[in-house]
Amino acid sequence: MEVVIGSLLAGLSGAAAAAGGEWLSLGSKHWAPSVVSKSGIGTAKAAAEARVTREEIEGWCQNWSPGDRGCAQRELSSPEAKRTYRASADCTRGRITAVDGETYTLAGRWDNSDIGGGRTRWRDRGGQIVGRDNASGGLGISQQWEVLCPEGRATARTAPAVQAPQQQRAPQPAAAMARSFSVGEVVYARSGPAWVRGRVTHVSQVAGPQGPELAYGVTLDSGARGVMPPHMLRKAPR
């Protein structure tokens, strides 16, 4: 099944990955390898392995390099595409070794003053907070933690979200004020003429025609997945 999401298409796959359609984030503008094995989820020895597939790379190329016929083969031939990506965590103590091989310590949750509000916040081994912007990659660590230590398991208690100081802020463009959805929320996504049930897996910020916009990573019940703008999503009935 193919989700119609225009220029935000991000590598939908018609079949679920071996571990239920999950993946490990390598960054908001990078293809994402599918999880092929997991163990100890929610425990002190949580681990996951992921590898990228041809379908994922072809979808990524359609989004980021449309018209580049050599994109898929070039990416598939790269050392990165041949790697097995590994992440592990001690869910009881709030520590994660991400796919970059670095270890990070849980430092509460992000406030709602910017992208990623409510998601986990991380400190590197030098004691510095890893930013939630695309370049810093803090939300990529959050996504890996969500695979290894999902909410509802015996995970470490997080400190309250750090509130940003009150300050006068410029009005946000209408696009940024669109309806919002949270990670883990059940939604219905537009797929051709139909609305298909799925779940929000991550939130990112993209450049829209009227300024920054939110985009939502969604995995459908069919196993297909993609990144979608809010107008392509509906709240599930309660």
Image (cartoon, rainbow, N blue to C red):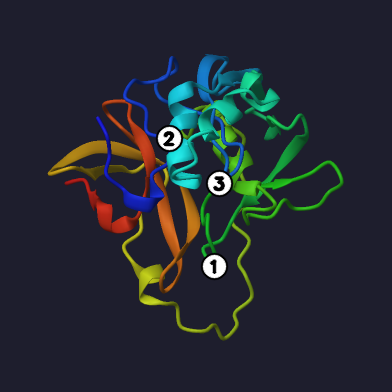
Q: CA distance from mark 2 to mark 3?
A: 14 Å
Measuring from the top left, give residue 183's x and y in whole percent. Answer: 42, 45
Measuring from the top left, give residue 187's x and y in whole percent. Answer: 26, 44
Assess disc 2: are there few (<14), some (14-19) or many (≥20) residues with their C-alpha within 10 Å of its C-alpha: many
Image mark for residue 172: none
Give the farthest residue toward the right. 126
Look at the numbered discs 1 and 2 and tell me whether their residues touch, using CB distance below 8 Å. Answer: no
Mark nearer the N terminus (3 vs 1): 3
User: Circle 1 sits in a helix, a strand or a loop, which is it?
Assistant: loop
Q: CA distance from mark 1 to mark 2?
A: 32 Å
Q: Residue at x 54, y 64 (%)?
A: 114
Question: What residue did someone put label 1 on?
Answer: 113
**Residue sitting nearer the eye, 210 or 105:** 210
Residue type, label 1: Ser
Residue type, label 2: Gly
Q: Nearer the viewer, mark 3 or mark 1?
A: 3
Which quarter of the picture shows residue 218?
top left
Q: Nearer the viewer, mark 2 or mark 3?
A: 2
User: Circle 2 sits in a helix, a strand or a loop, which is it?
Assistant: helix
> How many numbered dots are placed on residues in this image?
3
Image mark for residue 59: 2
Measuring from the top left, give residue 144's x and y in whole percent. Answer: 58, 33
Residue type, label 3: Ser
Question: What residue did someone put label 3 on?
Answer: 28
Q: CA distance from mark 3 to mark 1?
A: 20 Å
Mark nearer the N terminus (1 vs 2): 2
